[in-house]
Amino acid sequence: MAKKTKEFSASNFGTEEKTIERSTFYFGKENYKWMFIGLGLIVLGFILMMGADANTIDGKFDPTKWNEDIFSIRRIRIAPFLVIAGFVVQVFAILKRPKQA
């Protein structure tokens, strides 16, 4: 969308009005880059949370055995941290102002 502006000066007297082209999108390239980084962190966090159930041993369900892997550092600490970090990056990407040209 072009916005018309009038510049009042003696050298521009009698010439046509100048138009300034402005981008209609709020997000720039860098915003989208940060959004994809945040999305990647969220997806990676959820992938790291996946795994066997509490009663699954070697891929088979056995109600008489307990799988301690559900309490691994990867599933309890690292994966949720990545998901929360991904959401923080998403908020940053949305609030970051694009650079003016």
Image (cartoon, rainbow, N blue to C red):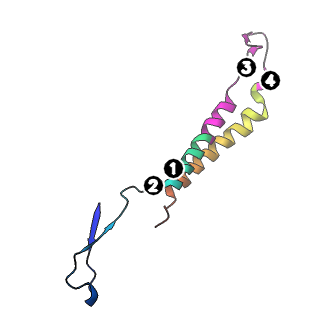
In this rendering, the answer to whether 50 lies above or below 56 is below
Relative depth, front residue between 13 and 45: 13
Q: Give the residue drawn at x 59%, y 50%.
A: 88
Q: Which residue is mark 2?
A: 27
Mark 2 in CB contact with mark 1 (< 8 angstroms): yes
The residue most toward the bottom is 10
Distance Cα–Cα, label 1 vs label 3? 38 Å
Q: Residues within 10 Å of mark 4 (few under 14, many from 20)?
A: few
Any mark on residue 89, and which?
none
Mark 4 in CB contact with mark 3 (< 8 angstroms): no
Q: Amino acid at mark 2?
A: Phe
Q: Is residue 39 left or right of residue 81?
A: left
Membership of 43 in magenta stretch: yes
Any mark on residue 32, and which?
1
Q: Give the residue drawn at x 67%, y 39%.
A: 80
Any mark on residue 68, and which?
4
Q: Is residue 88 left or right of residue 2?
A: right
Query: Helix, strand, or loop for circle 1?
Result: helix
Query: Helix, strand, or loop for circle 3?
Result: loop
Give, as a single range, the part of the protein colored magenta.
41-69
Q: Which residue is mark 3?
A: 54
Q: Earlier in the sequence, mark 4 or mark 1?
A: 1
